[in-house]
Amino acid sequence: MSNMHTSNTIDEVKSQLTKIREQGLSIGFVPTMGALHKGHLTLIKEARKENDFVVCSIFVNPIQFNNKTDLKKYPRNIELDMNMLQKEKCDLLFYPSEDEMLSTYQVEEFDFGGLDQVMEGKFRPGHFQGVATIVKRLFEIIEPQRAYFGMKDYQQLVIIHKTMKDNNLPVEIVPCSTIREKDGLAMSSRNQLLSKVERKQAATIYKVLKKTKIHSGFYTVNEIKQYVEAQFEKSKNFKLEYIEITDMYTLKPLKAWTQSNNVIACIAIQVGNVRLIDNIILFS
Ligand code: PAF
């Protein structure tokens, strides 16, 4: 097993990575908030395939949580995470404290060109300003060639892509497929907060999304949304926040299928007290 190094300070990680760059080695980066699962490990594997040196960061970023309780109960398992990263042959873990990351840094005000006006942006005010601030900061510290993001957080992926382009940060953003449990539930750190019953019920989310894809050719956009709403009214454990059918690039909600050739359905739902998101590409 290779020996993973852990750095807690920006200065240390920067000096380690300067040495790596001086050897002409490429750097692949996987930013995370920890509580790692197979989805994250797939990102590490992809980074391993395409780069000489793999860096992962674990930082539960307080400035992207609009809800204090959500931040407090966000799962944290650093020992387990370190073991998993070590097994995946991650070369360097950057695990900074809040002070280290945020004491000398201001939340930036990015113009996302409207990408943040819908879905997660609408339901979690300030969320994407916090995400983009921290991702830009991490990219400035790590200076990777490539960075890996899961498709489950689809809106995040589109927004990060735009932010890095607008800010001329030379990082290739690599989207990676959502990894699912056997029953279809998208892997997420939040899944471990579900009770046994809720965990079983949560499989409905992807089942409904798959039906959405099949039905999309036969029903109107509105009918599809009504269909999804009706499915989640069947149990009081579900509280649907939104089902949105949007263009994949502008994220503009559609009223008719003819408005776009690249269409994705995105959902956010509370199962018990746990907020989950998922999506499915309907056609592209
Ligand atoms: O997707 C996440 O885990 C977080 O939003 C990220 C990209 C690590 C930024 O804190």
Image: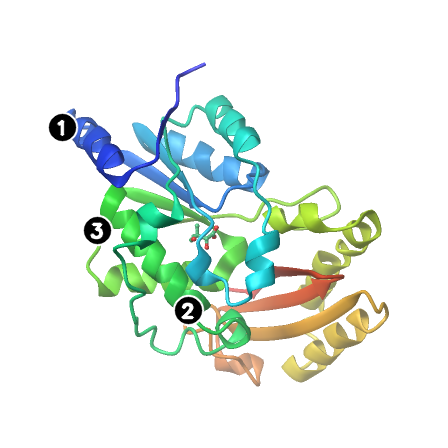
Residue 270 at x, y percent in the picture:
70, 65
Residue 10 coordinates in the image, percent (x, y) = 26, 40
Q: Is residue 188 visible?
A: no
Q: Is residue 249 visible?
A: yes
User: Along the line of sight, which residue is nearer the eye, 246 or 277?
Assistant: 277
The residue labelled by disc 1 is: 22
Residue located beneath label 3 in the image: 170
- Quarter assignment of residue 166: bottom left
Marks 2 and 1, how far apart at CA? 37 Å
Q: Disc 3 to disc 2, how far (Cα)?
A: 20 Å
Colouring used for the render: rainbow
Q: Nearer the viewer, residue 108 or 50?
A: 108
In percent of the image, x 64 and y 80: which residue is there? 221
Q: Position of residue 182 (x, y in %)?
A: 73, 41
Tag 3: amino acid? Pro
Quarter of the rendering containing residue 142:
top left
Residue that mark 2 sits on: 249
Could you tell me if the residues under marks 3 and 2 are in contact, i.e. CB atoms within 8 Å?
A: no
Side of 44 relative to 75 (left or right): left
The answer to whether 36 appears left or right of 45 in the picture is right
